[in-house]
Amino acid sequence: MSSESVPNPRLADLSAMGVAVWLDDLDRNRISSGGLARMIVEDSVHGVTTNPSIFDKAISGGAEAYAEQLTALARDGADADQIIQALTTDDVRNACDIMKGVFEATGHDDGRVSIEVDPRLARDTEGTIRQAKELWAIVDRPNALIKIPATPEGLPAITEVIGSGISVNVTLIFSVQRYREVVDAYVAGLELARDRGHDLDRIRSVASFFVSRIDTEVDRRLDEIGSDAAHALRGTAALATARLVWVAHEELLDTDRWRTLAAAGAHPQRPLWASTGVKDPSMPPTRYVLELVVEGCVNTMPEATLRAVADNGPVPEDTVSGTGAASAEVWAGLESLGITEADISATLESEGVEKFIDSWKQLIDTVAAAAQEA
């Protein structure tokens, strides 16, 4: 094996401890250059996630890589939305093909590549269902995941899409309560899929819990309070919430409802730690990775975070199990200061949807301008 293809030991250790390492980034240059394929070997990358912001950055910043296809589509009369769909689904399909070996080697758990429904549909149940099925058919790869936001309108869409035999990445989760609702939507979807005659063994799902944004919002409110008690709780909310999500995950696996589905071939919906790039420079850049190590989870990282983990060891064995009581105490302290999980979640969900819509609109403007010049 050449020096260029030696696995990074810290990322390999993280993977060996049962954390699926996924990359939170994708662009055509990474696909065509062989960069993504190298990351599978060198960085233990076992999956890829995308979102509207990632595609906005990819297409806006990598215009040359997309220029030929964009020009051809524009000259054929495609509008901006149609062009974006073609560009992004082609990238996801090609990334799925690169990930095929991982998909097969992991029994179809990993080697997954996510593509999100149009964020403008976040409050539209039926529109989300239609586009999720459309994207699944267009990408046409068994290792794709269709991303659906965990909005109140997204929850019934999750059930219907899972019930149609389609694998789903549920995104924009910010609270334990919403995570529990997502789990229920997933389980109901599996029951629907079973009743419709789908093979449950072919369906996979992850529940993407957004970590760093919780600390950003909670710490802002703690700073406004300004007391010693508030200062002592800075930087604690995100990890506490994620760890309580893991408690809820384990509780599901210990129910008769789940055992019935598992006996029929169903696979657990794995918690996925998303938004793991640290926003506070006073915190270590590996915080939302090394403090959330537990067998059976997924951690999707922007490349800067992945490189920080690769360069800073050692990797701890388990930093989640047994932390439920302490994590509940964190939220008891926050609530005593008037900070509630429900309010934080509602604020972040609204902001998250709007940020993705803004990125999508910016991408539409970029593509529309390029199409006019074609």
Image (cartoon, helix red, strand yellow):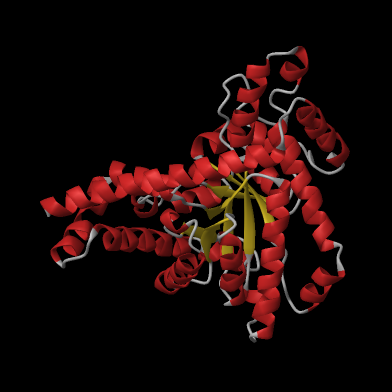
Q: Determine which quarter of the picture holds residue 276.
A: top right
Nearer the observer, 46 or 331:
331
For the image, the number of numbered tags is 0
Residue at 46 percent across and 54 percent down: it is 37
Image vertical order of residue 218 relative to residue 203, above or below: above
Nearer the observer, 342 or 26:
342
Q: Which residue lies furthest to the front in this view?
A: 338
Image vertical order of residue 47 relative to residue 56, above or below: below
Image vertical order of residue 203 relative to residue 112, above or below: below
Residue at 80 percent across and 77 percent down: it is 263
Residue at 82 percent across and 55 percent down: it is 250
Q: Determine which quarter of the picture holds residue 138.
A: bottom left
- Locate the C terminus by quadrant: bottom left
44 on left or right of 4:
right
Pinpoint residue 118: horizontal percent, then vertical percent. Answer: 42, 58
Image vertical order of residue 344 relative to residue 208, above or below: above
113 on left or right of 295:
left
Nearer the observer, 144 or 105:
144
Q: Residue furthest bottom?
A: 197
Pinpoint residue 24: horizontal percent, then vertical percent. Answer: 51, 46
> Is residue 314 visible in this depiction of the protein?
no
Pinpoint residue 172: horizontal percent, then vertical percent. Answer: 57, 49
Residue at 78 percent across and 34 percent down: it is 331
Pinpoint residue 184: horizontal percent, then vertical percent. Answer: 72, 63
136 on left or right of 21:
left
